[in-house]
Image (cartoon, grey):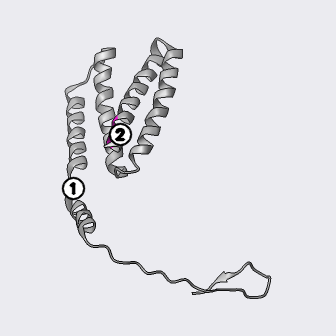
Amino acid sequence: MYYWFMLALAVIAEVVSTVGMKYASTSSPVFGYLVMGLMISLSFYAFSRAVVHIPLAVSYAIWEGLGLFLIGVAGVVLFGEYLTLGEMFAIALMLLGLLLVTFDKGQAGDEQEQLVAAPTAKLTTRTAPVTQRNSGATLGEVTL
């Protein structure tokens, strides 16, 4: 749950950072750049924590896909921007793809569940003797 929370925090921080970027370029440069710098740093930190447990492809799709959707909404609500019907359709397709990537376990998910449920085999290790050739020419070599 912690990793999903960090991913949600990364998405929110990215959206706030991009809104700050818009403010920096239009009305309030100092405040906008300050918000942008702090929030993008928080976003990258939170994202780096999320990918520890969530697969990179899934987490990146969520981070960027949901971020793009929310930034589009922020542009319309906060800045009075307009989205065409084609742009809204493209965003809807992207969200559908995001849902498929996020919630589809597919064959790989079945294999992972089987690996987790399968009894673990005992691993055996063997050490190789270390020998030294050409006395002093090298620090030592491992022979197997």
Image position of 62 with respect to 24: above or below: below
User: x, y percentage for residue 116?
Assistant: 27, 65
For residue 51, above or below residue 65? below
Q: Is residue 44 above or below residue 56?
A: above
The residue nearer to you, when weighing 4 against 69, is 4
Rendered residue at 32%/33% (across/down): 68
Dot 2 surroundings within 10 Å: few (below 14), some, or many (20 or more)? many
Front residue of this view, candidates 55 and 86: 55
Q: How many marks?
A: 2
Residue 114, picture quadrant: bottom left
Please provide percent x and percent y for residue 40. 46, 31
Residue 129, placed above or below residue 87: below
- Residue type at numbered disc 1: Lys
Q: Residue at x 33, y 27 (%)?
A: 71
Who is closer to the viewer here, 65 or 118? 118
Residue lying furthest right? 136
Which of the 4 image quadrants contains residue 105? bottom left
3D distance between C-alphas at marks 1 and 2: 19 Å
Residue positioned 43% across, 81% down in the render: 124
For the C terminus, which image quadrant?
bottom right
Q: Which residue is mark 1?
A: 105
Q: Which mark is residue 115?
A: none
Badge 1 density bin: few <14, some 14–19, many ≥20, Cα 10 Å: few
Magenta region's main secondary structure? helix
Magenta span includes 87: no
Q: Which residue is mark 2?
A: 7
Range drawn in magenta: 4-8
Query: Magenta span has 6?
Result: yes
Left or right placement of residue 30 versus residue 57 in this view: right
SS at mark 1? loop
